[in-house]
Image (tube, rainbow, N blue to C red):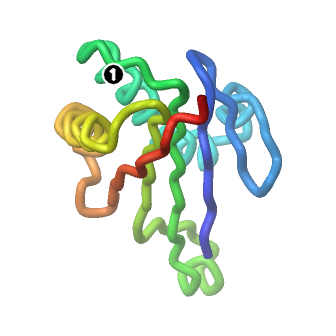
Amino acid sequence: MKMTFTLKGGVNPEVEIGGVTRSLRDMYDQGPLFAFMVSIPHCMFVMARQVCFMNDLKPNSVEIESTFIIDDEKKRTEGKTIINKILVTIKLEGLTEEQTKKVVEELKNDCPVYNSFPEKIEIESKFVASSS
């Protein structure tokens, strides 16, 4: 089973899950599982913005997409939600491909969530040409 959360926006990003957009606060209020799952891309969202700020980079938009790969067998047989892997894509519109990669590498070094679960989280950068 897969669940994908996409955070977009500014200081208070919105969260898209299953084609529905909700506020970040609403996602945290959904209970412990959703709070945990949204906290991972949220931490990376904040860290990406911070790394950009510290390097005087000004992306037009920041988008963090995280896909959680959940153990179907444990869910079905034991009712437990076990996350096998988290795939994270970071998009920084308006930055060059090299700038985006630099931000992602710094984020990997500094993000406490990523550093807590490096064996389960795969992060990739995705270059997005500026829409202007």
Furthest residue in direction left, as rendered: 109
Query: For this rendering, which residue is in front, 28 or 98?
Result: 98
- Which quadrant: the N terminus? bottom right
Residue depicted at 53% across the width and 71% down the height: 70
Residue 92 placement: quadrant: top left
83 lies above or below 116: below
Residue 97 in the figure: left or right of residue 64: left
In the picture of the structure, the residue carrying the numbered disc 1 is: 52
46 lies above or below 113: above
Residue depicted at 47% across the width and 66% down the height: 83
Query: For this rendering, which residue is in front, 62 or 43?
Result: 62
Residue depicted at 61% across the width and 77% down the height: 75
Q: Position of residue 18 (x, y in %)?
A: 76, 57
Residue 71 in the figure: left or right of residue 99: right
- Element type at mark 1: helix
Residue type highlighted by circle 1? Cys
